[in-house]
Image (cartoon, rainbow, N blue to C red):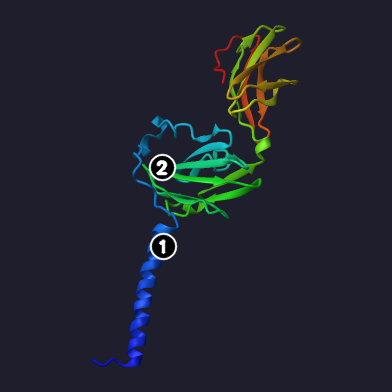
Amino acid sequence: MRIHTYEKIWLVAAMVLIVGIIATITYGAVGLGIAMIDDSEDTIDAANLGDDERFANPGIEQVGEDEYEVTVVARQFNYDPGTDQLRGFDPIEVPTDSEVTFYVTSGDVIHSFSVVDTNLNTMVVPGEVSTMTAVFDEPGEYGILCNEYCGPQHHDMEGRLVVHDVDEFDLFEIEAVDGPEAVDPGDEAAFTVTVANERLEERSTTVVFEFDEQTFEEDVTVDADGTADVTFTVDTDGLEVDDYSWTATVDDGMERIVEESGQLAVGEEEDEEEE
Ligand code: CUA
C-alpha cells in the first residue's frame, strides 16, 4: 500500500502528540510528587473534634529543636487559629528557619487552606487531615484564603499567618492565676501567676500584674517546656469597699500578649467566679 508523504508526516505528528500527552499526564500525576489528600490515614470524626487528641486544642506546638506542628480547624467561616482576633481567634504564628508542619482538618464542610504567595495550598475535607510542611526563611505576614465554595460567607473566610524571627519566638501562656476572690479592707492579697513556657528551651519573659491603679512587674525565667510561679502581693489599704479588677499579662516576645483577668472584692464576700 502506498501512503502519501503528507499523510505519513501527519501520522507521525499525531503519534508524537499522543505519546507526549500521555507522558505529560503521567509526569504531572506522579513525577512532581503532588498528591491528593491521603486517605490511608484513619479518618477522624469531624462532628466531634473536641474529643480528638490533636484537634481539641488547635494551635502551635514545638516538637523538636527546629520543628513545630500547627493544628488548624477550618469551619464556616473561619480558621482556628488563623482568623483575626475580632472573630475570636489568633493569627497562626510560626518561627523562621524551622520545619513547620501544618495539620488542617474541617469541622463541617469542605474548605481549603491556601496561604497566599506561597505554594501552601490544600483542600480541607471533613474527616481527613491535610498535612503540609514548610520552612519560612524571612519574617513576614501572609493571608490565608478559602478557595472551595463552602457557604454564603465563603468570600469572607480568611485568616492570617505571621512568621516571626525564631530568636524572638516565644510560646508563653498564663496557665493559671491563683488568688483570693475577696479580702477585708486593708488586707493584703497574694496572687500567684503560673507561666508556662511551651518552647523546648529555657526562655525569659516579664509578667505584669495590674490591680486597680497598682502595677507590678517581675522578670521570670521558665525552664524548657516547664512552668514557673510568680507571686504578686497587692495592698488594699485605703481602698473603699468595692469590686476591683486585676489583670495578669505575659509578654510573648511577639505582638501577642497573653492575658488573664478577674475581680477582687474588697470588704464583701461575693461568690463571683474567678477566671
Ligand atoms: Cu471555607 Cu470557602
Residue 102 visible? The answer is yes
Which residue sits at x=58%, y=37%? Answer: 66
Residue 254 visible? The answer is no
Mark 1: which amino acid? Tyr
The local secondary structure at tag 1 comes to helix
Nearer the observer, 35 or 219: 35
Query: Ligand 1 near label 2 (Cβ, under 8 Å)?
Result: no
The residue to which callout 1 is attached is 27
Which residue sits at x=65%, y=25%? Answer: 202
The residue to which callout 2 is attached is 129
- Residue 210 numbered tag: none
Nearer the observer, 186 or 242: 186
In the image, 209: left or right of 56?
right
Which residue sits at x=42%, y=30%? Answer: 53
Q: Position of residue 123 (x, y in %)?
A: 43, 50
In the image, 74: left or right of 9?
right
State whether residue 177 is above or below residue 22: above
In 3D space, how far apart are the residues under numbered discs 2 and 1 (Cα atoms)?
A: 26 Å
Question: Mark 2 vs mark 1: which is more N-terminal?
Answer: 1
Quarter the N terminus occupies: bottom left
Nearer the observer, 220 or 78: 220
Nearer the viewer's eye, disc 2 or disc 1?
Answer: 1
Q: Position of residue 242 (x, y in %)?
A: 67, 15
Q: Position of residue 168 (x, y in %)?
A: 68, 36
The local secondary structure at tag 2 comes to loop
Mark 2: which amino acid? Val
Disc 2 packing (10 Å; few <14; some 14–19; many ≥20) = many
Count how many numbered circles sit on residues in the image: 2
Which residue sits at x=57%, y=12%? Answer: 270
